[in-house]
Amino acid sequence: MRSSVLGLGALLGLLSGGASRAADGPLRIDPQPAYSPECGCSLTEGEQPWVLTFVPPLLMQELDDGAPAVLRLDGADRVLPMVTGALNVWGASCGMPVNARFAGAPYVVWFAGFVTRTCYENEGCEHFEFRGRLSVVREDGARTARPVTGSCGC
């Protein structure tokens, strides 16, 4: 009997708006499920350069100029339009700053970093790598930031 009362209380909380209050909790940015774009840009948590094992990305973006980013925020996939900057800075030299900002209610996301590796001079190489910080702010003031590594290309 006790468990059904608790279940009913939880259900009433959800029906009365408890679900909307969940957004007031800590902001979560989670890795994408075991998926990585074949071509595009992606950011992966951590400061270490790319490793040979698959690490699910925190942010994914197609190579098209101005393409939206896909992130898993607060447990749901969010598609956020690009507002300023670009992750795909093809042809950039090592050390060049990389900045991109994405926004879609209730989130603002930005990346600030720099190019760490290029391979433009090598035949058949179609990518470059960068490192920096991915920051997310929710309209209720919750925020989080993570060190990330990333790359763009195929």
Image: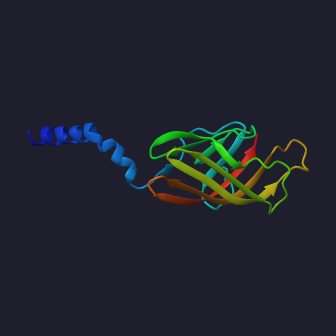
Is residue 7 among what the camera can see? Answer: yes
Task: Tell whether 34 sits left or right of 67.
Answer: left
Q: What colouring method underlies this structural image?
A: rainbow
Q: In which quarter of the image is residue 99?
A: bottom right
Front residue of 46 and 78: 78
- Measuring from the top left, give residue 6's x and y in whole percent: 16, 43
Task: Tell whether 39 sits left or right of 25.
Answer: right
For image coordinates 67% across by 50% down, the residue present is: 52
Is residue 57 among what the camera can see? Answer: no
- Measuring from the top left, give residue 65's x and y in whole percent: 75, 40
For image coordinates 87% across by 41% down, the residue present is: 124
For image coordinates 57% across by 57% down, the residue present is: 135
Residue 62 vertical position relative to residue 47 in the rendered view, above or below: above
Question: Quadrant where the N terminus lies?
Answer: top left
Front residue of 122 and 141: 141
For image coordinates 75% across by 37% down, the residue present is: 64
- Measuring from the top left, give residue 80's x and y in whole percent: 59, 42
